[in-house]
Image (tube, helix red, strand yellow):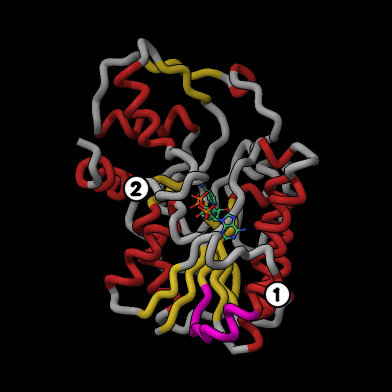
Amino acid sequence: MKILLTGARGNLGSQLLSIFKSAGHEVIATEREELDITDEAAVHKFVIEARPDVIVNGAAYNFVDKIEDEAIYPIAYAINALGPKYLADAGLKIDALIVHYSTDYVFAGTQVDGYKEDDATAPISKYGETKVAGEQFVINSGANYLILRLSKIFGPAGTSAVAKPGFVDLMIQLAATKPELKIVDEEVGMPSYTVDIAAETLCLISSNTPSGIYHLVNPGPGVTWYQFAEEIFAIKPSPTPRIPVSASVFPRPAARPSYAMLLNTKLPPLRTRTAALTEYLNVANQS
Ligand SMILES: NC(=O)c1ccc[n+]([C@@H]2O[C@H](COP(=O)([O-])OP(=O)(O)OC[C@H]3O[C@@H](n4cnc5c(N)ncnc54)[C@H](OP(=O)(O)O)[C@@H]3O)[C@@H](O)[C@H]2O)c1
């Protein structure tokens, strides 16, 4: 299979690149310099010349708080909404499958039991708005598509300067250097492992999965940031005290969904979050 990958040095993109390559696929891995997904003409030219079987869009603008700034919003909209539109429109012309990643932040976060794939979106942040717009453009493009919604992700860091530092690494690092940790005990989600998301992506594109929206998460109970940190320290113990605090202790411009559990009702489950986290902490350079 010939796969065009955008955002190849992001946190998820770097895992996608590694898994596609090790499975022996021909990967055209692009970073922003080679293919800026906000440049419509460049996207069409690149896609039509490269003629990939699959376009996997790992590119995104993920700085949730910055997007609330009206000067930044158009930049984020171009990357999160127009970029996937251009990729899907170009993909349609050559009959390529488009794989695009979305987020639990497309939901309002009021459903305490979680969200199924076809539940109505109702974002409460500008970031969420751009991601809903991206989903809609891909769905309406007429191309074959997989929209894979993710929750908070963890895994090896990407090499992009804009790749966000992962929560797991941050907790380990802060526990080693700070006298105590105050951790937000809100925003219930389902943290998931980029290595598993990348492997499942390959599985889905290799098996003629029907076009649609899918929720890709390592199963486990929904957890707040504090509860997730406790899961980390249960595997990698630390004597540093942890204090659960309200989100209001760290005021941020963007609202976050209070309950954003993504229910996977369509795909076989991935391994559990505990199994994935244990592997990451024990194997992936986390000595
Ligand atoms: N991070 C999370 O916790 C989380 C949670 C839910 C969903 N998601 C979704 O998962 C996906 C992957 O996120 P991630 O955390 O892996 O992202 P990331 O680490 O921030 O990487 C983003 C990548 O996008 C590239 N990029 C940005 N603007 C671009 C442009 N105009 N043209 C081409 N490439 C561009 C960056 O490339 P350069 O290095 O060249 O700038 C970077 O490689 C995204 O769709 C995101 O919305 C993430």
Mark found first going from the N terminus, 1 or 2? 1
Which residue occupies 76% across, 37% down? 69
Q: Secondary structure at mark 1?
A: helix
Residue type highlighted by circle 2: Pro
Side of 155 where 214 appears, left or right: right
- Give x and y (percent) for residue 24: 29, 78
What quarter of the picture does the C terminus occupy? Answer: top left
Q: Distance from label 1 to label 2 (Cα)?
A: 33 Å
Query: Dividing the image into 4 quarters, which one contains the N terminus?
Result: bottom left
> For the magenta stretch, what is the residue range?
45-55
Asked if the residues shown at circle 1 and circle 2 are in contact, with their CB atoms under 8 angstroms apart, the answer is no
The residue at the point 51 percent across, 70 percent down is 56
Coordinates of residue 33 in the picture (x, y in percent): 54, 61
Residue, disc 2: 156
Q: Please check the rendered image and state whether residue 49 is part of the magenta-colored stretch, yes or no.
A: yes
Q: Which mark is residue 137?
A: none
> What crowding class fits label 1: few (fewer than 14 Cα within 10 Å), some (14-19), or many (20 or more)?
few
Q: Amino acid at mark 1?
A: Ala
What residue is pinned by disc 1?
A: 41
Number of callouts = 2
Q: Residue furthest bottom?
A: 94
Mark 2, other Cα within 10 Å: few <14 / some 14–19 / many ≥20: many
Residue 192 seen: yes
Query: Which tag is nearer the camera, tag 1 or tag 2?
Result: 1
Q: Is residue 214 visible?
A: no
Of 185 and 154, which appears nearest the observer? 154
Nearest the viewer among 209 and 81 is 81
Q: Is residue 263 above or below residue 141?
A: above
Nearer to me, 164 or 101: 164
Residue 139 location in percent, x, y? 69, 73
Work out which residue is located at the far top of the displayed protein and give it: 179
Q: Is residue 1 magenta?
A: no
